[in-house]
Amino acid sequence: MIHRLLTIIGEYFLFLRQVFSKPEKWRIFFKKLVEEMNAMGIGSLLIVAIVSVSMGSVITIQTAMQIESSWIPTWTVGFVSRTSIVMELCPTIISLLLVGNLGSRITAEIGSMRVTEQIDALEVMGINPASHLVLPKVIASLIVNPVLIIYSICFALVGGYITIILSGSVSPYDFMDGLTYCFRVYDIIYAVTKTFVFAFIMSTVSSFYGYRIEGGALELGKASTQGIMVSSFLILIINVLITQIML
Amino acid sequence: MIELKNVSKYFGEKQVLFDINTQFEEGKVNLIIGRSGSGKTVMMKCLVGLYAPEEGEVLYNGRNFHHFSHADQRKLRAEMGMVFQGSALFDSMTIEENVMFPLDMLTDMGDKEKIDRVNFCLNRVELPNVNKLYPAELSGGMKKRAAIARAIACNPRYLFCDEPNSGLDPKTSLTIDELLTDITHEFGITTVINTHDLNSVIVIGETISFIYEGKLAWRGNSQNVLTSDNKPLNDFIFAQPLTQRIRQTL
């Protein structure tokens, strides 16, 4: 069991070494990078917006319900909602959502190329398949995921604000006061840093599981599930470490 | 010339190739034949460097491929073209982009020159007017021909084909055989084909290596393949009732 785990970790780092080598042609690399950013970013906008609005609404309702005391000022609802959304919910939950959405797509795409010998074809041509196929995906996710998280934070806060207007539990002015109270740019840096690391884990682990497939369609399904599970597990562990280090 | 010297290949405990010694001659159609599971594809993957044999040498003009520097391996691979069993065309690209891909990656040709070369290759394999189609829109035979066009795009010195006739009807198989033979002689390519198609064996095999249970059981050519007294080879060649009748007439 430990031997197998160490072997997989070793293979992962050898794979990363292959991925982070100089692209064969920069023009082709940038073309693929733009294609990947387009597919990853545009393809995720709707689902991220829906989940973010829902998450913002729910956290605002729950916070408002918990802080029903005359001793606690009502702007606290906005403050607590903002802090939860910016520092934890959007970076972590949306990153986990993106693992399911983008990560599984990456594993399936690379895995099906492996199964249908397209990766072998690249290798026979003398092209480094790991760098050619995976590097644009990794760089694209490092650029796109933080942007998606900022976008998600905006939608979650808007969701919370709309909920406050509709429910009337707290005055919208007090809620806005809370949202802007003691705002620190460092919180955004913290959120983006986390997302950046999560994006790296998602893209490299998903690619790794697709790249090492041996067999057919059944293995492809298994690899996709494994990629999602391992990425999610690592994201949760790293989340604790980053939080401990940065806060 | 390509040569295999004492090549053995293992997957874990299981030995797949046993001490193979054979040669593939320059400018000729060289066949590797044998039953399914005999080790033909593994042998071809050793030849193109996708697998490294545990024992023995794969020699290109006397130099061991697996001892080449990374740069030399890349240089040699730029001289190789390969047609895979399932064609291995890139799904996300059109046929034109597929054929242009090695030109984009491995040459410094201008756009006009690349388009001309792509059209030449597609016309050569008799696939005009498919430039903008995707692989999923082509039949099996057309895919194979597109894969051949991609494989010859960079004027390769060596062409490797893994079961180019598999899954094709007899007429299309013939067309692919003729095409591979013509291309080999026209461009002076050293072609190595993995096959268990009997027409290929009888008609196009200028050298034939017969693999039986991972061992080289016989070596010859299309002239003497039907008259050999090698039992495993005869069991393979004359397995079908039709070929048994042919044998009776020989």
Image (cartoon, coloured by chain):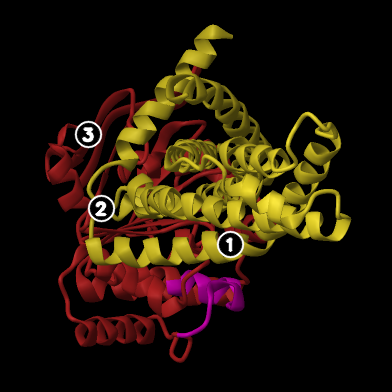
Question: Which portion, as a residue range, is magenta?
Answer: B132-146
Callout 1: helix, strand or loop? helix
Check if mark 3's residue and mark 2's residue have beta carbons within 8 Å. no
Q: Indicate whether residue A9 is drawn in magenta.
A: no
Residue A23 - label: 2
Say which amino acid is labelled 2: Pro
Chain that is coloured red in the picture: B
What is the spatial separation of the Cα atoms under label 3 and label 1, in whole angstroms? 47 Å
The residue tagged 1 is B249
Give the distance between the C-alpha atoms of the residues marked 1 and 2, in whole angstroms: 60 Å
Chain A display color = yellow
Residue highlighted by disc 3: B66
Against B100, residue A22 (above or below) is above
Residue at (36%, 73%) from the top-left corner?
Answer: B99
Which amino acid lies under the numbered mark 1 shown in the image of this protein?
Thr
Please say whether residue B222 is visible from this viewpoint. yes
